[in-house]
Amino acid sequence: MSLDAGHDRCRMASVRSREGCAMESVRNAATPRGVHRARTETVALRRDTGLAGWAYTLGAPGPEAPRTRLLARIGGVVAIVAVTAYLAWRITATLPPDGWNRTAAWVLVGFEALPLIGLLVRLVTLWNLDSVAPRPVSASSTHLRVAVLIPTYNEPVEVIAPTIAAACRLEPAHETWVLDDGDRDWVADLCAAYGARYVRRPVHDHAKAGNMNHALDVMAREAAEGAPEVDVIAVLDCDHVPLPHFLTATLGWFDDPEIALVQGPQEFYNAGAFDDDGVTGEQGLFFHVLMASRNHDGAGPFWCGSTSLLRLRALRGVGGVATDTIVEDMHTTLRLIRDGWKTVYHHQTLAVGLAPATAEQYLLQRRRWGMGAMQVLAHERLWAAKRWLSWRNYYEYLSGTLWWLDGVGTIAVFVVPTAILLSGAQTSTASVGAFTAVFTAMFVLRVWGLRRLFRHHLQLAPAFALRVFRIPVGLSCTWWLLTRRTLSFEVTPKAGAEQRSRGRVPRALRVLSVLALAVLGYAAAGLAGLVPWRASSGATLASAAWLVMAAGALGLGMRRIVSPTYATSRRNAYRVGIRAAVELHGDRGELVDVSTGGAAVRFPASVPLAAGDEVRLALPQAPPVLMRVVRTVADGEIQNVSLRVPEGDWEGHRILSLWLFHTPADAVIGLPPGVPAAAATSHRGRRRTLAAIAAAGTDRS
């Protein structure tokens, strides 16, 4: 149905009430012919909807709650005592008297003792997570000239439009530069519509690092010609949508002339992503605990690529963004530290992005990070102490790069117990009942303590499931260290797939699972007297306990990979479940969900809607958006209707994006002040854990 542009005018009126905000009926006789108007009334969170974990850290950072800090310290001590007591019991009460059996037992005990060193270090480094915030800035209180840089390559409009639209709307006054390595004309059109500067380069080398360095060259050339100098660049991955306080909350850090980098946490709004654990995701532990613990002199964080700000003078002083490795962010940070600059961590949700939705995307991203870390390890010779690195930074950078080899250690969890089991060595003299009781007590206390030390950002089942991915990543990293082959930067796909398909289990995981089950099955048959077996029940259990845990983690990981929940999707945009009453020609319906490029609604089957029809959807306190009906699916007396913003309608994408991420106050009933609609999720997560996280910080208001 055609749209008469001459009549494209809509008049909106909002009505405030004690319960929230609703949109009045749009009484406009000039609605284009052939276009249905759907009005939204009261918008509310669904009963089955909760808030994403990142919504609990939207307030300004402050000191850690005393009770949380005390429980964390108690938890760390309990975990250490539990492991130490278990090891003492193993050494004093279960070791065989002499010979090969005693040697094998010591090997197993040494293997069991490995986590103790890490626990001791973490207790020290996580002793205090107090955060501070700089003064908030406004247009009248800052002299800094800021440019927000958004590198992009091949992402669809549903991914990049929200980031560009939100960036252009930030305060204080700044420039928004979109660095398009895909040379797409439609991106240039979108930038012109939103007020962003579009930049493309003639030579596409060094991926994201080269893209940013080209922008720095453009700035330098223009400054030489008399343009005002840029003082600070803010960097956002093209899928990371900045929230309104992104600049005002962070620019105050640059009052300190020694600070070169401000890094914020990376949060993700696509609940149900592959690494989602129902709370803050797998990276929640890194950004809310490990990075937060480094927010003091001599232990500053490294640049994580996105949700960050850099002093341009400092970046130019080290030759721009590093291009020697495929993890340009970490490598550039080392150069800044070597040059005498400081880095700080701003522990507040500043932007939200898209996490890998499938196992393939997750593995591609982690493998790139891991092999890039190996490049930094080799290039900077991090195993050797540096005068320009404090002991804490030396430890963090060395352990942070070597961590990617943890997959090799995970293989040892299979190999060591398996070898001892098959050897028939008597590694324990304890009875089955005694060993089971002591091992279980140690494991439970250790997990209880770790969860508190990690401030509830450790979810056991997802952590075990995702741990198995360290195996293929660790093998890839080891292979690179041996071959030193040239690496290319691989972009994590963000667009929808052509067809829906489940993930495939990597071959290494399939082989390990078969071996683990075969060994455990043979051991069980041996204890039952069905096959030759020399080890006692207690000795078998001492080794099999670790193999059972490893096999369980493998099972969880492989089940996650092939789960239909993490299959590829044909959609380019994540949809947020928001309930709203809508009306069309007097017939009432319901808004089911909304995204940056479309929406889903339900209407009685009697309402005449067909594919190709055009509808104007008006969300509370937002202008109406023209949408086209993609399809209708009958479900008894109800029809489910899919709506999409027409191709090339940049204003429609902008309106939906800003409503989702810069949500007007009181637009959604049940949404706390300052929380965007994108925080609504049907994945309710773990309420008690989220409550504990919410209570962990103070003055987040």
Image (tube, grey):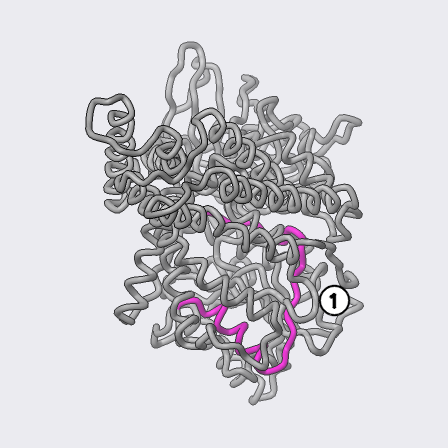
- The answer to whether 487 is drawn above or below residue 513 in the figure is below
Of residues 482 and 236, the one nearer the viewer is 482
Q: Does the segment drawn in magenta span residue 336? A: yes
Q: Does the segment drawn in magenta span residue 685? A: no
Residue under label 1:
252
- Tag 1: residue type? Gly
Of residues 123 and 504, the one nearer the viewer is 123
147 vs 102, left or right, is: right
**Residue 386, image x and y in percent?**
54, 79
Residue 499 visible somewhere in the drawing: no
Name the residue furthest top: 637
Q: Quadrant of residue 68?
A: top right
Q: Quadrant of residue 396?
A: bottom right
**Residue drawn 41% across the image and 41% down it:** 96
- Kind of element beneath mark 1: helix
**Residue drawn 37% across the image and 49% down it:** 103
**Residue 469, image x and y in percent?**
37, 47
**Residue drawn 46% across the image and 67% down it:** 179
Name the residue furthest left: 531
**Residue 541, image x and y in percent?**
39, 32
- The answer to whether 371 is drawn above or below residue 67 in the figure is below
Quadrant of the image containing the N terminus: top left
Of residues 83 and 284, the one nearer the viewer is 83
Residue 460 visible somewhere in the drawing: yes
Q: Which residues are magenta?
A: 326-355
**Residue 226, image x and y in percent?**
60, 87
- The answer to whether 24 is drawn above or below residue 288 in the figure is above
Of residues 658 and 520, the one nearer the viewer is 520
- The answer to whether 302 is drawn above or below residue 39 in the figure is below
**Residue drawn 29% across the image and 37% down it:** 516
